[in-house]
Image: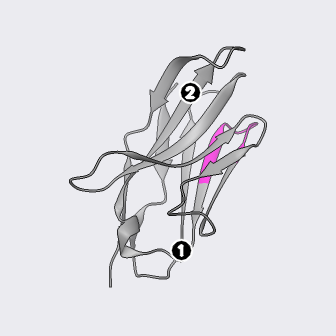
Amino acid sequence: VQLVESGGGVVQPGDSLRLSCAASERLFSINTMYWYRQAPGKQRELVAEITDGGSTYYAESVKGRFTISRDNAEATVHLQMNSLKPEDTAVYYCNVKYYTEYDVPFADYWGQGIQVTVSS
């Protein structure tokens, strides 16, 4: 599975951006799609995730500002980012993991990453 991110850029504090990630093929169950980010000098961190059933999780730092969504038919995942802050500046990565019925991951795919810069 190849993942391609789009929608990054340079914005001012308080602005919005919508990231998208398109998979090269339709995903099969059981899978979860993730957005991670990595700021300069920091470890990669989980931003948000969404299961194939639509359950979501958000990091505390983005809760209430970011919304993750997916289109299973199109094999895409989106991250709507509102009220952006300078500390949201990072390279954002799309990730897909496949799981067994026992919740054990057995496949892991990453996009190349896309830059988001929030600066006045």
Vertical placement of 57 versus 33: above or below?
below
Q: Which residues are magenta?
A: 70-78
Vertical placement of 37 versus 89: above or below?
above
Q: Quadrant of the C terminus?
A: bottom left
Going 66% across and 36% down the picture, which residue do you hit?
75
| Depth check, front residue: 102 or 107 | 102
Magenta stretch: includes residue 72 = yes
Q: Is residue 23 left or right of residue 94?
A: right
On the image, the x and y values in percent for residue 101 come to: 72, 14
Q: Which residue is mark 2?
A: 97
> Whole-Å distance between the Cαs marked 2 and 1?
27 Å
| Depth check, front residue: 17 or 86 | 86
Q: Is residue 47 left or right of residue 76?
A: left
Q: Which residue is mark 1?
A: 16
Residue type at mark 1: give it: Ser
On the image, the x and y values in percent for residue 46 come to: 47, 46
Between label 2 and label 1, give the one nearer the viewer: 2
